[in-house]
Image (cartoon, grey):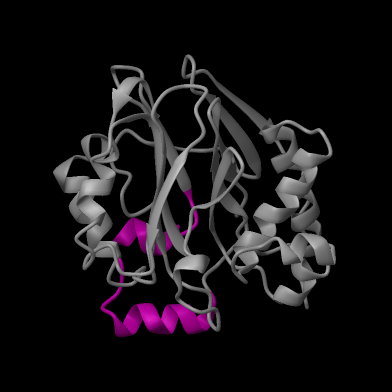
Amino acid sequence: MCRLFAYVAPDTSAADRELGEEGIESFLSLARLHGDGWGWAGVARTGEAPEVRKSPLSAAADPDFRPTIATAGHAAMMHLRWATLGLPVELRNAHPFRAGDVSFEHNGSLKPIERVRAMLSPEALAGMSGETDSEMYFTLIREQLAAGADLPEATARVVRRLRAAFPLSSLNAILLDGDQLVVVHASARSVLPDDDVEEIAQLGGLPDDHNEDYFALRWKRSPDGTVLISSTGVAGAGWETLPPESVTTVRLEDGTMATEALGTALPAAVTD
């Protein structure tokens, strides 16, 4: 489980500018729990491939974090990692992942991981840099891109497939290329596992809205036209929750937004 933040600006901005000092401090306060690495991906100008920087260190302890989020660009996304139990805290497993001109970050856990691994060909698995369920999710999207789908459609196809296989998992994700930011808000019935709740309690708990709606993704448009996306724990007053079980695309060229309902039906209860 992780924390996500992203922006698309009409001109040039930076993640630290959009968060503000209070937002940065809120983000860093979350790093005491989500301390298994951090990452940033940014597009300097529309049409350019994203640059990715990441670390297996906690954002609160890594001196490279603040300079990185001050990097100017047209769009960027950030990630704080809370590693799925049993997956190593290593650079190769840190988000965002990048392949070609697309970067990807995820907030959720696909368990059992063997179920998503079985969806991938041996060739696709061999092309992965790490071993996480999140990178497998991204690899499924890459397969759809290779088959000719555009990024929003490739993403929606994979989310529908994963929702059928993982009815209660959070599939929340953000993807960024040179033309668009794609946001998956698909966590309608996701809850924190008991072992994660226990770990939170041991670390002193979380801010109220972060605790009661952990998987919600929210958005707002600033007066200058900048579109902001954030997990709970950072988003404050004036933010709206993205539609549930949806894929939203933000065009880098003009900041226009389009949302596609996934139409996924969730059962009342599931037994694995």
The residue lying furthest to the left in this view is 21
Q: Does the magenta-highlighted stretch encompass residue 73?
A: no
| Spot occupied by residue 89 in the image (x, y as percentages of width and height) | 45, 76
The C terminus is located in which quarter? bottom right
Highlighted magenta segment, given as a residue range: 193-216
| Spot occupied by residue 147 in the image (x, y as percentages of width and height) | 84, 39
Q: Is residue 219 left or right of residue 31?
A: right
| 90 to 48, vertically: above or below | below
| Spot occupied by residue 132 in the image (x, y as percentages of width and height) | 61, 69
Which residue is rendered at x = 73% and y = 62% of the image? 167
Which residue is rendered at x = 68% and y = 74% of the image? 111
| 134 to 258, vertically: above or below | below
| Spot occupied by residue 244 in the image (x, y as percentages of width and height) | 60, 43
Find residue 63 and report its image quarter.
bottom left
- The total of numbered circles placed on residues is 0
Q: In this view, does 129 lie to the left or right of 18?
A: right
| 163 to 15, vertically: above or below | below
Is residue 228 among what the camera can see? no
| 256 to 268, vertically: above or below | above
Along the viewing direction, whichever of 2 and 242 lies nearer the viewer: 2
Along the viewing direction, whichever of 210 and 117 lies nearer the viewer: 117
Find residue 21 and report its image quarter.
top left
Is residue 128 among what the camera can see? yes
Q: Does the magenta-highlighted stretch encompass residue 202?
A: yes
Along the viewing direction, whichever of 141 and 128 lies nearer the viewer: 128
